[in-house]
Image (cartoon, helix red, strand yellow):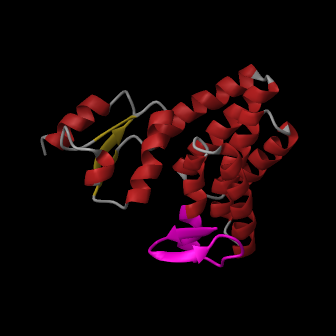
Amino acid sequence: MQTELAGTTRAGAGCDAPAADLLVRCQAVWFELDDDPPAACASARHLVVLAERAGDARAAAYARCAVAWSIGQDGGEVAEGLDLLDRIETVLDRLDDPALRLRWHCAAAIVLGAMGDRSARFDHLEQMRIASLELDDVWHELVALHDMAALVPIVTEAGGFVAPISEGDRVLETGSLIAANSEIFDKFAKVIRNA
């Protein structure tokens, strides 16, 4: 399998991608889960191995989120899903990464829902909302497409809003966006658009 990353082509299996490319790939696999869940889960598992081999705990945690989410969606081996969540949490304890924390809560809500633990699932859904508040004042102009592609679903899944800076533009085409939680979005967008 050939994967295009940061302008260079690398073989997917056994590649020694630079750390930044590996992190981007581990973050991006989350968004492949909707298109082809089994293939995305297999890819995420492979990325976990590559990230561990590279000693990149952050990248491995991002890929583990995708695997855990997939397990929860498929009603797979819940014990494995819980183990993955525990391993991600140990990384979160050492990092300040709101986007990873948001994905972890999302994956936890799915896995716990598969277990039938409605109370714990609700707690994680509430924590997703709180984690989205950490991302509430995001304003990017002309950032990379992979940054946009990652940000839009994270914010909207957490209950936030994303819109182009210039009304009528398409966020992924122009590279300009406004993102905020639902409580401040309208005021924030007005300030940015009138700046």
Of residues 95 and 68, which is closer to you in this image? 68
In this picture, residue 162 sits left or right of residue 80: left
Please say if 66 is above or below 77: below
Q: Position of residue 155 (x, y in %)?
A: 45, 39
Residue at figure coordinates x 35%, y 41% from the top left: 179
Please say if 101 is above or below 19: above
Q: Can residue 17 be found in the magenta stretch?
A: yes
In this picture, residue 78 sits left or right of residue 140: right
Residue at figure coordinates x 58%, y 76% from the top left: 10
Residue 192 lies in quadrant: top left
Q: Position of residue 107 (x, y in %)?
A: 67, 39
Please say if 136 is above or below 183: below
Residue 112 lies in quadrant: top right
Please say if 69 is above or below 24: above
Residue at figure coordinates x 69%, y 41% from the top left: 69
Q: Can residue 8 be found in the magenta stretch?
A: yes
Q: Position of residue 87 (x, y in %)?
A: 77, 52
In this picture, residue 60 sits left or right of residue 25: right
The number of callouts visible is 0
Residue 123 lies in quadrant: top right
The answer, for residue 91, to whether it is visible in the render is: no
Residue that extends furthest to the front in the rendered view of this protein: 1
Magenta span: 1-24
Q: Position of residue 5 (x, y in %)?
A: 50, 70
Residue at figure coordinates x 55%, y 55% from the top left: 28
The answer, for residue 117, to whether it is visible in the render is: yes
In this picture, residue 98 sits left or right of residue 61: left
Which quadrant holds the N terminus? bottom right
